[in-house]
């Protein structure tokens, strides 16, 4: 996965990226409904090894479906989290947010103004998988930002958890529902 750095001025910018990702997902859905070829092993081969899908941020760029799924989940959580963070911190984020997608140095989301906000973001079947939640909390504890977050999506969480944000030391743990 290549590194993509995206600057967001506000909630509307984040929403525009969510809509782009939704269109790419719809394109994949259409392709899957038209798939006719062999059985299960042939389908798995196509999904894993061919460019049957597309880049979540550019539907014209082919990509294998497994990568599209992984990137789509992470990107959706990132942009949905950005929308929530803009809502929670209107004034401190007046200069915007930087979203680091892929393998870039630094946090996944950070304020354009140095030291205001930092966030790690992930999507997982369970937040405890590979101890990801605890690792991200530990990483954010060491971060220099005034406002520190770990934002995640897991299908096994309820929407109610957004209302009761967990705080571990000075890191806020935020469930982000990508299905709203």
Image (cartoon, grey):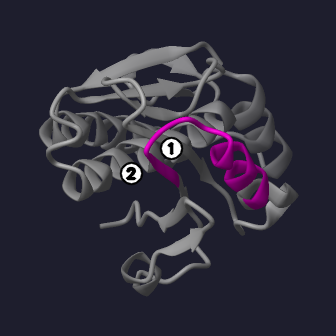
Percent coordinates x, y for residue 154 in the rendering: 59, 67
Asked if residue 141 lies left or right of residue 87, the reply is right
Q: Earlier in the sequence, mark 1 or mark 2?
A: 2
| Mark 2 Cα shell of 10 Å, populated few (<14), some (14-19), many (≥20) | many
Front one among 172 and 18: 172
Residue occupying image coordinates x 62% and y 35%: 65
Up-down relation of residue 105 to residue 167 (above or below): above
* Residue depicted at 50% across the width and 49% down the height: 148
Q: Is residue 174 visible?
A: yes
User: SS at mark 1?
Assistant: strand
Region in magenta:
134-149
Residue designated by label 1: 119
Which mark identifies residue 133?
A: none
Q: Is residue 135 above or below residue 46?
A: below
Residue 38 horizontal side relative to residue 20, left or right: right
Looking at this view, is 104 or 41 the one in front? 104
The answer to whether marks 1 and 2 mark residues whose Cβ atoms lie closer than 8 Å is: yes
- Whether the magenta-drawn stretch holds residue 143 is answered as yes
Element on which disc 2 rests? helix
Write down the quadrant of residue 59 in the picture.
top left
Q: Residue 81 got which mark?
A: 2
Quadrant in the rendering for residue 69 = top right
Mark 1 is surrounded, within 10 Å at the Cα level, by few (under 14), some (14 to 19) or many (20 or more) other residues, namely many
Real-space CA distance between mark 1 and mark 2, rounded to the nearest whole angstrom: 9 Å
Camera sees residue 35: no
Location of the C terminus by quadrant is bottom left
Q: Position of residue 130 (x, y in %)?
A: 86, 56
Which residue sits at x=38%, y=51%?
Answer: 81
On whether residue 28 falls in the magenta region, the answer is: no
């Amino acid at each position: 996965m290549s590194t993509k750095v995206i600057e967001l001025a506000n909630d509307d910018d984040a929403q525009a990226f969510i809509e782009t990702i939704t269109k790419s997902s719809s394109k994949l859905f259409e392709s899957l409904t038209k798939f006719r070829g062999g059985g299960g092993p042939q389908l798995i081969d196509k999904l894993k090894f061919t460019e049957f899908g597309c880049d979540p941020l550019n539907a014209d760029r082919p990509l294998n479906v497994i990568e599209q799924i992984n990137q789509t989940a992470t990107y959706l959580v990132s942009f949905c989290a950005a929308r929530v963070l803009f809502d929670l911190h209107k004034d401190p984020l007046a200069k915007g947010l930087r979203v680091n997608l892929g393998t870039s140095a630094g946090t996944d989301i950070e304020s354009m103004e140095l030291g205001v906000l930092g966030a790690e973001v992930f999507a997982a079947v369970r937040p405890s998988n590979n101890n990801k939640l605890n690792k991200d909390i530990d990483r954010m504890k060491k971060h220099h930002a005034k406002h520190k977050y770990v934002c995640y999506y897991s299908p096994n969480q309820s929407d109610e958890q957004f209302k009761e944000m967990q705080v571990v030391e000075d890191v806020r743990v935020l469930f982000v529902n990508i299905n709203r």
